[in-house]
Every structure is written in structure tokens, then in C-alpha cells.
Image (cartoon, grey):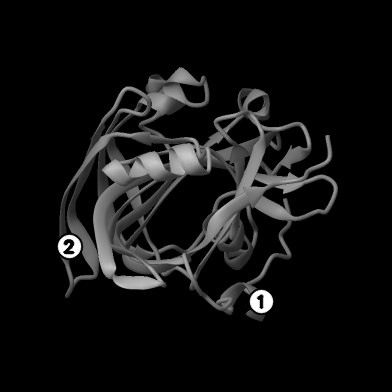
Amino acid sequence: MADHLAFTSELLTRPPVAGWDVEASLEHFAIVSYAVPPQRVRPHVYPGFDLDYFPGPNGDPLVWVSMVPFEDQDFRFVAVPWLRFRFGQTNYRTYVIDRSTGRRAVWFFGTTLDSWTVTIPRHAWKLPWHRGRVRFDCAFDSQAGRYTAYRMATRATWGPVELELEDSGVPVSVIPGYADLEAGLVALTHPLVGVYYRRDGRLGTYRIWHDRLRCTSGRVIRARIGLFDRLGLVPYSEQACPHSVLLQHRTEFTIYLPPGRYQAAG
């Protein structure tokens, strides 16, 4: 944990894009996070990474795990911007620090993608991405600046989901576990490096960029997140009580491709 985290010019300046880098407009973007004991997460993360702890209500260390659903509206490669795709996607992640460098990152448990194009990253780059049928049933009130309805579901063997959220329309004002809101937002919403176990067991990585998110706070009405239950991260019985729910109607993301291999201390 690091309460001194801040939105620096380095974090907020987009690196140049070229070639097969991707630009995408994301809608119905949410971060649903749970605070869990680190022993639940540790077996799923490469030993060269420390878990990013924060103090719980009783002072015991906790770790975030998050599901991040959204709909790619116009996923497009910089080299061929006229070729565009639209699909639902859900990322599953926790938050880590490379012990050898001190660099912060997200650790991806995997991703569900509702597109035939999932076969490309699965086979060409060995990404832990899985096919699923993702559907959003959402209504956004632009005048009120909030969702009046937010429901999404994923039909998949690997990561089935049933999720319904309520949006307060109120900007996020606190991230529990962090004395400073900005530090909490940097840690939870703004990691720009992702690492993961490739499908061949090796470590992979890719980079993203997005501007500072302007999220509203929400709450869970209903949640059944199959992957979290199956991995022992968050049992179904605990999924109605997340650490936080952050919502943003639309945001722009950049993904730098191709992914690479990650070298971390063992």
C-alpha cells in the first residue's frame, strides 16, 4: 500500500500509438471490487509479485480483487481504423507490485470476450482470454449523470456472471483503506501495466493507457460471479457486499500491442 500515490503527468500523458495498437471507446464501464484476505489470492499470483495490501477495518491486511465489465463500442487498430468491432468484455484482476522493481501492476486472472476474434489473442499471444456471450441491459440518464438501470450477464463455462448494480450518480469521494482519495483512485483505477500467466504457463504482459476516470459510486443489487467463487476468491455468499462499486458511462482506452513476455524475480 502507498498513500502517497498521485496522478502524475507521466500517468496522464498518452504514449504515442502506431501499427497494431488499439483505440477503443468503452461504455458501461464498471469496477466491482472485493476486499479479501491475501491467502485467498496468493496461490493464483506468480511468486515474484507482492500483493498490494491495504488495512482493513480491524487493521488486518486485505487485497482487492475486481471484475471489470464493459462494452467495446468501436475497437479499432491504429493501422486500419476503418475496421471496427463491437463486443462485451469482462476482465478479472487483482493488484500487485513487482518485488524486483517496485513497479505496480494488475494481475489478470483472465478475460471473457464476446467475439470470434478472441481466437487471435488466445492462440497467437497465448492470452488467458475465453469466449462468452456477454449482454448488457443498461439505461443511462445523461441529465442526471447516472444509470437508471445497469444489468449485465455472461453465459460462459469459464466465467459466468449475473450482475445488477445501482448507480448513486454521486462522484466517488472515498476509497476505503486509503486516507487520500487520489491515492486510492490511482491504485484501483489507474494501473497501466497488466501481467498474467499465459496459456502456456509463462508470464506475459501488455500496456494500456486511459485518462483519469470520473466515476460515480454504486452498490450491488445482485451478483453471481462464477470465476471468483470457483477460484475461492469471493464465495457467492459474500458477493452482495463488495468493497466498492465504481461506474463510468463512457471512457477511451488505448491498448499497446502486441503483448510481450514479462521477466520478474522468482
Task: Kindly state the secondary structure of the residue where label 1 is placed.
Answer: helix
Relative image position of residue 145 (x, y in whole percent): 24, 70
- One can see residue 66 in this view: no
Specify whether 138 is left or right of 102.
Answer: left
Looking at the image, tell me whether mark 2 or mark 1 is earlier in sequence order.
1
Amino acid type, label 1: Glu
The answer to whether the residue labelled 2 contacts the one labelled 1, judged by CB atoms less than 8 Å apart, is no
Number of numbered discs visible in the structure rendering: 2
Q: Is residue 117 above or below residue 201?
A: below
Specify the label residue 38 is tagged with.
none
Relative image position of residue 43 (x, y in whole percent): 66, 23
Q: Nearer the viewer, mark 2 or mark 1?
A: 1
Relative image position of residue 81 (x, y in whole percent): 32, 73
Residue at (78%, 37%) from the top-left corner? Answer: 48
Q: Is residue 34 above or below residue 7?
A: above
Residue at (57%, 52%) from the top-left corner? Answer: 259
Residue linked to disc 2: 140
Q: Is residue 174 above or below residue 98?
A: below
Task: Kindly state the secondary structure of the residue where label 2 is placed.
Answer: strand
Relative image position of residue 36 (x, y in whole percent): 57, 31
Q: Is residue 86 above or below residue 158?
A: below
Specify whether 261 is left or right of 254.
Answer: right
Residue linked to disc 1: 10
Mark 1 burial class by Cα count in 10 Å: few <14, some 14-19, many 20+: few
Amino acid type, label 2: Phe
- One can see residue 198 in this view: yes
Residue at (52%, 75%) from the top-left corner? Answer: 17
Spatial distance from mark 2 to mark 1, Cα to Cα? Answer: 32 Å
Residue at (18%, 72%) from the top-left corner? Answer: 142
Q: Nearer the viewer, residue 2 or 207?
A: 207
Specify whether 239 is left or right of 84.
Answer: right
